[in-house]
Image: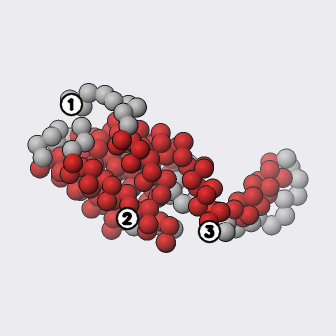
């Protein structure tokens, strides 16, 4: 169960991550590692399930390291999700991941449009389609990564406000 200290750490961390990712295209370790430590620490300090943060962080590591290894998300995104898991546990981390998956394309496209990078995404899609069909695709366009920090932040806030995956927390 998320307590006010967990929600404060979560929402503050997500806000900083979203702004930093928009500005620099990165979510720094200087944010994610303290978020993980504070998430786990607040579970111990407020007397809730002390292992909830550790299990949430571990579950996020397993799931999001796989997504990182597959090239679906960047390392900072995976570590931010570990911070989410540390703050609110594995069930709410999974719900945040579900919201992230639902919101990734629409929010990501809006961010790319606002940054003037939507045309590059279209060029990359055309290049990939030509190459998949065995046609001469020409020179590969510059890679376009969707910025995930704002999407993860939106997913985390929505997950903390909803109960899609409400499960008993007893360990």
What kind of element bears circle 3? loop
State the residue position of label 2.
16
Q: Quote the CA–CA distance across marks 2 and 1.
A: 31 Å
Q: Foreground mark, 2 or 1?
A: 2
Q: CA distance from mark 3 to mark 1?
A: 45 Å
Q: Are marks 2 and 1 in contact (CB under 8 Å)?
A: no
Give the x, y percent position of residue 155.
44, 47
Asked which secondary structure carries label 1, the reply is loop
Residue furthest right as drawn? 135
Which of the marked residues, 3 or 1, is nearer the chain's N terminus? 3
Residue 114 or residue 36, whichever sits in front: 114
Which residue has dot 3 on it?
115
Residue count near mark 1 (Cα–Cα under 10 Å), binned few <14, some 14–19, many ≥20 = few
The residue carrying mark 1 is 171
Residue 103 percent location from the top left of the image: 54, 46
- Residue that appears at 63% across and 62% down: 112
Q: Report the quarter where the C terminus lies.
A: top left
Give the mark nearest the N terminus, 3 or 2. Answer: 2
């Amino acid at each position: 169960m998320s307590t006010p200290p967990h929600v404060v750490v979560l929402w503050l961390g997500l806000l900083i991550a979203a702004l930093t990712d928009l500005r620099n295209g990165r979510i720094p370790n200087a944010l994610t590692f303290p978020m993980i430590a504070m998430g786990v620490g607040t579970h111990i300090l407020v007397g809730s399930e002390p292992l909830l943060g550790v299990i949430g962080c571990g579950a996020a590591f397993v799931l999001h390291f796989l997504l990182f290894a597959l090239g679906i998300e960047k390392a900072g995104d995976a570590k931010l999700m570990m911070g989410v898991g540390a703050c609110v546990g594995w069930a709410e981390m999974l719900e945040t991941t579900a919201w992230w998956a639902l919101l990734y394309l629409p929010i990501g496209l809006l961010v790319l449009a606002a940054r003037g990078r939507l045309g590059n995404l279209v060029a990359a899609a055309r290049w990939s389609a030509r190459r998949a069909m065995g046609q001469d695709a020409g020179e590969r366009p510059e890679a376009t990564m969707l910025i995930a920090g704002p999407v993860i932040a939106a997913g985390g806030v929505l997950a903390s406000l909803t109960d899609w995956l409400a499960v008993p927390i007893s360990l």
